Image (cartoon, grey):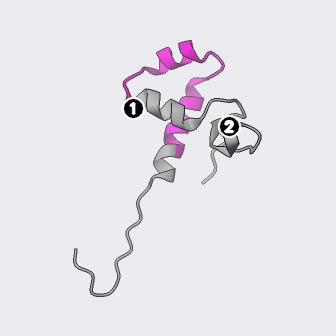
Amino acid sequence: MFFKRITFNNMIMGGQACIRGMRIPVSLIVNLVANGMSNEKIIEQYPDLEQADIADALHYAAWITREEVYMTAGAAC
């Protein structure tokens, strides 16, 4: 999967997933949304962000946390 707005740089925020090379981690955006902050309020607090940045952060978070279950022979469900 490719996320155009999500970047990784060891010199920025220790290499964690950030928005467009800025010091705004994806985890921050996801946390704000999870705690009920609207996109408009997030952009008001972080004016360098765009709506597409928030959308890509959420898509990245959904992708990275996808769950894959591998059943072994004889395993009970």
Kindly indicate the quadrant of the structure image that contains residue 19.
top right
The disc labelled 1 sits on which kind of residue?
A: Ala
Q: Is residue 15 visible?
A: yes
Which stretch appears magenta? Answer: 34-60
Residue 9 in the image: state x and y as whole percent.
Answer: 74, 43
Residue at position x 46%, y 52% from top?
A: 65
Name the residue at the bottom extreme: 73
Residue at position x 64%, y 43% from top?
A: 16
Question: Is 50 in the magenta?
Answer: yes
Viewer-side residue, 55 vs 11:
11
Q: Is residue 7 visible?
A: no
**Secondary structure under badge 1?**
helix
Q: Quadrant of the N terminus?
A: bottom right
Residue annotated with mark 1: 34
Residue 54 in the image: state x and y as whole percent.
Answer: 54, 30
- Work out how far the residue at label 1 is from the one at label 2, CA to CA, in angstroms: 21 Å
**Circle nearer the viewer, 1 or 2:** 2
The disc labelled 2 sits on which kind of residue?
A: Met
Residue 28 in the image: state x and y as whole percent.
Answer: 53, 31
Name the residue at the front extreme: 14
Residue annotated with mark 2: 13
